[in-house]
Amino acid sequence: MNVFDVLMERGYIAQTTHEEEIRELLDKESVTFYIGFDPTADSLHVGHFIAMMFMAHMQRGGHKPIALLGGGTAMVGDPSGRTDIRQMLTKEKIEHNVNSIKKQLEKFIDFRDGKAILVNNADWLLDLNYVDFLREVGTHFSVNRMLTAECFKQRLEKGLSFLEFNYMLMQGYDFYVLNEKYGCKMQLGGNDQWSNMIAGMELVRRKAGKQVYAMTCTLLTNSEGDKMGKTAKGAVWLDPEKTTPYEFYQYWRNVDDEDVDKCLRMLTFVPMDEVRRLSQLEGAEINEAKKILAFEVTKLIHGEDEARKAAETAEALFGSGGDLESMPTTELSSSIFEEGIGILSLLTQVGLTKSNGEARRLITQGGIHVDDEQVKDPGILITLDSFRDNKIIIRKGKKVYHLIKLV
């Protein structure tokens, strides 16, 4: 099956510039395409995951990805989808973020033997001469037309800085550079990038006289139309230090029933026949589909071992119809944790150990986990920052769980 038809069947494609030409092109040759990731944080999050899957499907279909890290464009900030100006980042912070994101992309996309390319637009944007850039690139952009773009329209009411106004020119220039250097014929990205992508396509046509193409993927939203990947404590990150594999697994395990079909189609490689079967399950049976969804998504990001461990932990906690309400629980005043309480004292206070000595031995043997993270230092303090939604779960050994709630 043509990869275009695969993408359509799985629900990725939102808009295309030339649908029939793109389908034909993807059928007859290996196409070099790119997706950009601006390093505004030191990890990608669930919002980026769908673009990574878009890229992975294209690569599996025989096409060559360019993963473009926006070390240059991040110096300006993308106004798309925002009502306020982005925080200005230092060059050092951006470089740190770029290096962190590289590792995540390399785990997901096959860069071996030139099957994919990883580039940073800081390599060509940061050394540009501004006047030369205006003469070579700015002359091809109409301000009147730019102001009609959705990414700028919603910002005009609250104020659009000239700094951000340059973002479209810079992203358009990326497409031109990648076309000249690598023969890149197509840009992929989220649907909120449509205006920027059209601008890049037009720049390539005007400067190089070449036809290039653009496709956008639907943004990951739930059945209410809100962006997925947010929890009470913030974004669901792909970095295990920011969102543990267990928390990541539980996020997908707890999606609404109505969102299971979309998530299985777009965030896993589960065959479509199986997706359709799972999506038709109802009542309690839909939980089986959610377990498969959570396992498959966690496996893609964190590997099969971590996915299995997360699934086993969830099963131990909730598998027999149990829930947090049925777990042994101690309620403690938040004031106890303002200065912090030692883990040894806490374990003894809630009855998980009989003495601080027993608690210390358990920790040195690797037998204590807090929110599924192994405690390695018997001297650590548990503070208010340790709690999520005013709760922590302590696990002793493999099967003894204790919930601590703040009151």
Image: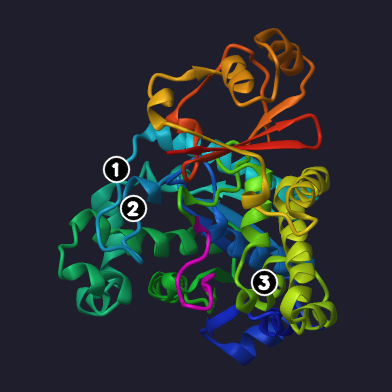
- Figure quadrant of residue 266: bottom right
Residue 167 position within the rendered picture, expressed as x and y whole percent measured from the top left: 32, 59
Residue for badge 2: 77
Residue 402 position within the rendered picture, expressed as x and y whole percent measured from the top left: 66, 36
Q: CA distance from mark 1 to mark 2?
A: 8 Å
* Tag 2: amino acid: Gly
Q: Earlier in the sequence, mark 1 or mark 2?
A: 2
Residue 226 in the magenta stretch? The answer is yes
Q: Is residue 59 visible?
A: no
Mark 3: give few (<14), some (14-19) or many (20+) Cα within 10 Å.
many
Closer to the camera in the image, 330 or 339? 330
- Marks 1 and 3 close (CB-CB < 8 Å): no
* Tag 1: amino acid: Met
Mark 1 or 3, which is nearer the eye?
3
* Tag 3: amino acid: Met
Residue for badge 3: 266
Q: Is residue 400 visible?
A: yes
Closer to the camera in the image, 59 or 21? 59
Secondary structure at numbered mark 1:
loop
In this picture, which residue range is highlighted in magenta?
Answer: 219-230
Residue 351 position within the rendered picture, expressed as x and y whole percent measured from the top left: 66, 25
